[in-house]
């Protein structure tokens, strides 16, 4: 059985006000209560605890050592309850409590988290459930459940809004044997070397690739493999820009297909029933960056 508490959040919040305001009269003004009511509330709190929390010197109230220790533990609870009450008031007006956001793994992270920071400032009461996918289809994401998704465009998709194009560039480490050859590289030449594919990325290409290849689950794993001169691959330019600038990774001079564009779209699970919080997050994502990266 859960034991009932002997004190209330209201009592601790009153004590906090007395300390922050420096006295009972000032706290009463802040709380819009009478001074006697504030004094009685604090007295009841001390009585319930069986210890002195405040001591008055002149007209100013100070915490005792015990009072300082206990109030320090109580303040987070007071703040949590205030946030809970605020969230309850907002949700009572019909706004969703949670937004399920599914993001394509190659979508720029700075863009994503800038939008989430801005969203938190205006919708801190709304929980965002973030899930990252590698070239997952809308159908597969729908099976897992989402409210808002940034995903690769599909020919049958009619409701998505174009948000950006991600350039996938063929690269290899500067010490890779492919960079020892002169002139443009043919598909036949490439097929004699190990290529890394990201799970879900260019599935058709991976299945028809005649040469040796790896398939990894994350973009980071593919970048690491190419960066160790183990293989070559098509990687998101924005995620390897620093390595290209440093000369560690070097674009491959292919006859065809040196780069590929992945068009990304923003999709709502139910365009006819978009919650206000979901729409707000969607607009932040749409307005947060240039058309291409």
Image (tube, helix red, strand yellow):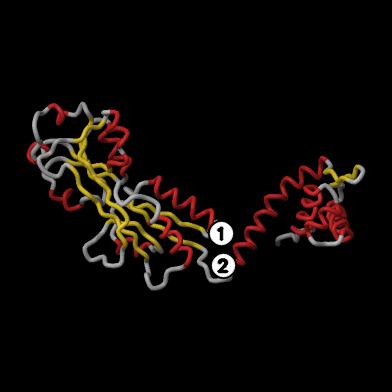
> Of 93 and 9, which appears nearest the observer?
93
Tell me if 246 is positioned left or right of 36 in this view: left
> Of 110 and 85, which appears nearest the observer?
110
Q: Residue at x 8, y 39 (%)?
A: 186
* Mark linked to residue 91: 2
Q: Residues within 10 Å of mark 2 (few under 14, many from 20)?
A: some
N-terminal-most mark, 2 or 1 = 2
Residue 103's x, y, as percent? 36, 54
> Label 1 near label 2: C-beta < 8 Å?
yes
Tell me if 7 is positioned left or right of 185 in this view: right
Determine whether the residue tagged by mark 2 lies in a helix, strand or loop.
helix
Q: Residue furthest bottom?
A: 272
Determine whether the residue tagged by mark 1 lies in a helix, strand or loop.
loop
**Between marks 2 and 1, how big is the CA–CA gap?**
9 Å
Residue under label 1: 125
Residue 262's x, y, as percent? 24, 51
């Amino acid at each position: 059985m859960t034991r009932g508490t002997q004190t209330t959040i209201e009592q601790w919040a009153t004590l906090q006000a007395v300390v922050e305001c420096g006295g009972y009269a000032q706290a009463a003004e802040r709380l819009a209560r009478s001074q006697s009511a504030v004094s009685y509330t604090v007295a009841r709190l001390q009585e319930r605890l069986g210890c002195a929390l405040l001591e008055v010197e002149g007209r100013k109230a100070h915490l005792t050592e015990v009072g300082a220790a206990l109030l320090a533990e109580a303040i987070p609870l007071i703040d949590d309850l205030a946030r809970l009450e605020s969230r309850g008031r907002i949700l009572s007006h019909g706004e969703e409590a949670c937004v399920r956001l599914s993001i394509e793994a190659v979508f720029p992270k700075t863009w994503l988290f800038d939008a989430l920071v801005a969203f938190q400032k205006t919708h801190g009461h709304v929980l965002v459930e973030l899930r990252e996918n590698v070239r997952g289809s809308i159908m597969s994401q729908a099976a897992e459940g989402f409210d808002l998704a940034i995903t690769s465009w599909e020919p049958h998709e009619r409701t998505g809004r174009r948000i950006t194009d991600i350039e996938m560039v063929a690269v290899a480490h500067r010490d890779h044997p492919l960079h020892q050859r002169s002139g443009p590289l043919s598909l036949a030449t490439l097929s004699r070397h190990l290529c890394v594919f990201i799970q879900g990325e260019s599935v058709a290409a991976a299945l028809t690739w005649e040469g040796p290849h790896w398939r990894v689950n994350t973009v980071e794993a593919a970048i690491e493999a190419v960066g160790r001169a183990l293989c070559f691959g098509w990687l998101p330019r924005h995620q390897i820009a620093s390595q290209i600038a440093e000369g560690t990774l070097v674009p491959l001079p292919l006859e065809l297909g040196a780069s590929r564009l992945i068009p990304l779209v923003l999709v709502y699970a139910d365009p006819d029933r978009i919650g206000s919080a979901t729409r707000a997050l969607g607009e932040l994502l749409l307005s947060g960056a240039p058309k291409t990266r």
